[in-house]
Image (cartoon, rainbow, N blue to C red):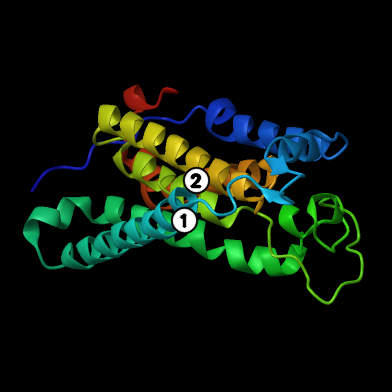
Amino acid sequence: MQQRPHPRPINPWLYLGLPLAVAVALLLLELSSLDMDIANLFYDPVAGEFIGHHSYLLETIMHDRVKQLVILIGLLSLGAFALSFFWQKLFSWRRELGCLVLALGLSTAFITPLKKVTQVQCPWSLTQFGGKETYSELLQHRPATDKPGLCWPGGHAATGFCLFGLFFMLRDRKPKLARVAFVVALVAGSALGLGRMLQGAHFLSHNLWTAVFCWLIGLGSYYLVLYRNGMAEAPASERRVA
């Protein structure tokens, strides 16, 4: 049975400090009109709708099919984790698979409850873009409405950003492949988030918040399942920041 490698020490300024800095920047972004300015670039006032509203590529391929693909990845990960209790070839990967399942599950499960709590309106629902709802900043009181918003954080962006879990799963075993997984997650989350912005479903900040949350969930899952115990077992010579 393959021996599990000791985890490489984490640089907290990079892994934790950078996403927290992005979160602070996003709070400050609320003081600007950047979200609205970018959304205006994707809105056609003549047609009275966002330019991606009727796009087959954005709705059917990038929204529906990609989501189904990631669900399949999640189910395969869960199946592999279950098999790791019975199939000897997967014994040594049990913790990594458990970390992946936890990260994928939490990165997608937190979206809907948070949407219901925050009740942030989608761009397409706002009066500025032909809707009937009143815009409010993230930390502001929501105007009274019969249709509370369900648009923060960006749900579809999480379909891509949840794959940060693959990066953390592979970080110690396959560093080069882990870097590939990081790029895939970053590109997928960004592309899916942009697609929904073109449709008027989200502001830029909604998707950036999702990226921060998914990264922190992946990091937390990695720390709890792999890093903490692994570092305790590592010899002192290996406990240097990487």
Residue 46 — which label?
none
Res 28 quadrant in image: top right
Residue nearer the viewer, 194 or 79: 194
Residue that lies at the very extreme toward the bottom in this rendered image: 146
Question: Which mark sits nearer the N-terminus, 1 or 2?
Answer: 1
Give the camera-side residue of 175 and 237: 175
- The residue positioned 24% from the left and 56% from the top of the image is 94
Is 133 in front, or is 161? 133
Lateral position of residue 192 relative to residue 166, left or right: right
In percent of the image, x 48 and y 56: which residue is there? 59
Q: Position of residue 69 (x, y in %)?
A: 33, 57
Image quadrant in which you'd find residue 231: top left
Note whether residue 235 is visible: no
Verify CB contact (< 8 Å) between mark 1 and mark 2: yes
| Crowd rating for badge 2 (residues with CA inside 10 Å; few <14, some 14–19, many 20+) | many
Query: Which numbered circle lies on residue 192?
Result: 2
Q: Which residue is mark 1?
A: 63
Could you tell me residue 212's position as x and y percent? 60, 42
Q: Secondary structure at mark 1?
A: helix
Q: Tell me residue 242's x, y (percent).
A: 42, 23
Q: How many marks?
A: 2
Q: Amino acid at mark 1?
A: His
Report x, y in % for residue 176.
27, 27
Residue 13: quadrant of the picture: top right
